[in-house]
Image: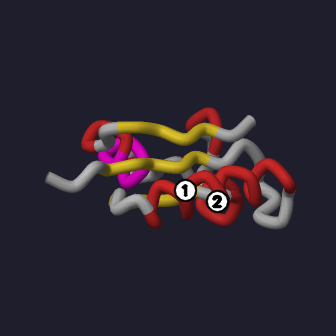
Amino acid sequence: MTTRIVGIGGTVNPLSSTEQAMRLAAAVAGDAGAEVTIFGGDYLRALPHYRGQGYGIEDGAELVEAVRRADGLIISA
């Protein structure tokens, strides 16, 4: 059985040191054989926050489903 890891960035800046650290940790998990899914700055920036204008029920659904299926999380803040 493959271990599933989800990485969630802590900033909307994909070049931030926080995102780089999360991606480094995710790469180590991937090298160890885990299936890794990343939700970084680009993904987070596209989410309409607080159900404001433009919000749709499907927004963020991919992230929610990935977390539900995950065996572990890497959360950067």
- Any magenta on residue 7? no
Left of 60 or right of it: where is 18? Answer: right
How far from the left and from the top, in percent, is residue 43? 60, 61
How far from the left and from the top, in percent, is residue 61? 37, 49
Can residue 56 be spotted in the picture?
no
Residue 48 to residue 73: above or below: below
Q: What residue span does the magenta drawing correspond to? A: 62-66
What is the secondary structure assignment of the residue under circle 1? Answer: helix
Left of 52 or right of it: where is 17? Answer: right
In the rendered structure, which amino acid carries the disc numbered 2? Arg
How far from the left and from the top, in percent, is residue 1? 14, 52
User: Is there a contact, CB below 8 Å, between mark 1 and mark 2?
Assistant: yes
Residue 20 to residue 76: above or below: below
Counting every numbered tag in the picture gives 2
Q: Residue at x 34, y 62 (%)?
A: 33
Between 9 and 24, the one nearer to me in the picture: 24
How far from the left and from the top, in percent, is residue 60? 46, 49
In the rendered structure, which amino acid carries the disc numbered 1? Ala
- How far apart in space, not on screen, are marks 1 and 2 (Cα)? 5 Å
User: Which quarter of the image is occupied by the C terminus?
Assistant: top right
Left of 11 or right of it: where is 49? Answer: left
Can residue 17 be spotted in the picture?
yes
Disc 2: CA contacts within 10 A as few (<14), some (14-19) or many (>=20)? many
Residue 37, by quadrant, is: bottom left
Residue 16, by quadrant, is: bottom right
Q: Which residue is mark 1?
A: 26
Q: Which residue is mark 2?
A: 23
What is the secondary structure assignment of the residue under circle 2? Answer: helix
